Image: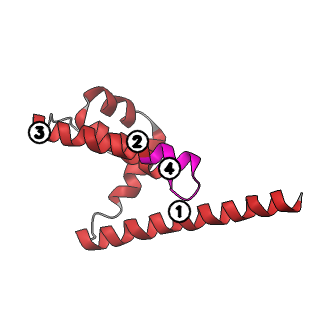
Amino acid sequence: MPLPRPRFRPLPFAYKIVGIMLVACFLLIGLAGLILPIIPGILFLFLALYVLTRISRRAAAYAHSQPWFNRGVRHMRATDGLSVGERCKFGLWVMARGMVNGVEWGISRLRRMVGD
């Protein structure tokens, strides 16, 4: 079932400034995550785009027209029944799993390099 198209509501100026700073932080962490396998870069890039959709009407129109973004939002909405503390725990577990995957990848690459 497709998600309903969200109605774009402009945010106050102060919220936009905070949102832009969040987007910049998530973008930097996401780009570092693409280089460093320990940080889940795709997750932070998705979060940057999600926050940007709350700030920019064009970004919202583009993102909500993409099936992969709608799947990600559907996954985020699956946690709607959780409290804030439970969401934080869940987010930390997801991030920890990404870090474990990155370390496993790094170890396997190191073994391949040493074995060659």
Q: Residue at x 30, y 73 (%)?
A: 86
Q: Which residue lies most toward the right here?
A: 116
Q: Which mark is residue 114?
A: none
Alpha-carbon span between mark 1 and mark 2: 17 Å
- The answer for how far apart the CA atoms under marks 4 and 1 are is 9 Å
Which residues lie in the magenta part? 29-42
Q: Residues within 10 Å of mark 1 (few under 14, many from 20)?
A: some
Counting from the top left corner in percent of width and height, residue 24 is at 34, 40
Main SS, magenta residues: helix
Mark found first going from the N terminus, 3 or 4: 3
Q: Is residue 42 visible?
A: yes
Answer whether residue 60 is magenta in the image.
no
Q: Residue 14 shows which numbered tag?
A: 3
**Disc 4 target residue:** 41
Q: Amino acid at mark 1?
A: Gly
Residue in the image at 44% along x and 70% along y: 93
Identify the residue under disc 1: 98
- Residue at point 38% right, 53% down? 74
Whole-angstrom CA distance, mark 3 to mark 4, is: 27 Å
Are dots 3 and 1 in contact, CB under 8 Å?
Answer: no
SS for callout 2: helix
Image marks 3 and 2: residues in contact by CB distance under 8 Å: no
Mark 3 surroundings: few (<14), some (14-19) or many (≥20) residues within 10 A: few
Mark 3–mark 1 Cα distance, whole angstroms, equals: 33 Å
How far apart, in angstroms, are the residues tagged by discs 3 and 2? Answer: 20 Å
Instruction: Tell me, yes or no, whether the two marked residues, 4 and 1, touch with CB atoms within 8 Å.
Output: no
Query: Which disc is residue 27 wearing?
Result: 2
> Label 4 neighbourhood size at 10 Å, few (<14), some (14-19), many (20+)?
many
Label 1 vs 2, first from the N-terminus: 2
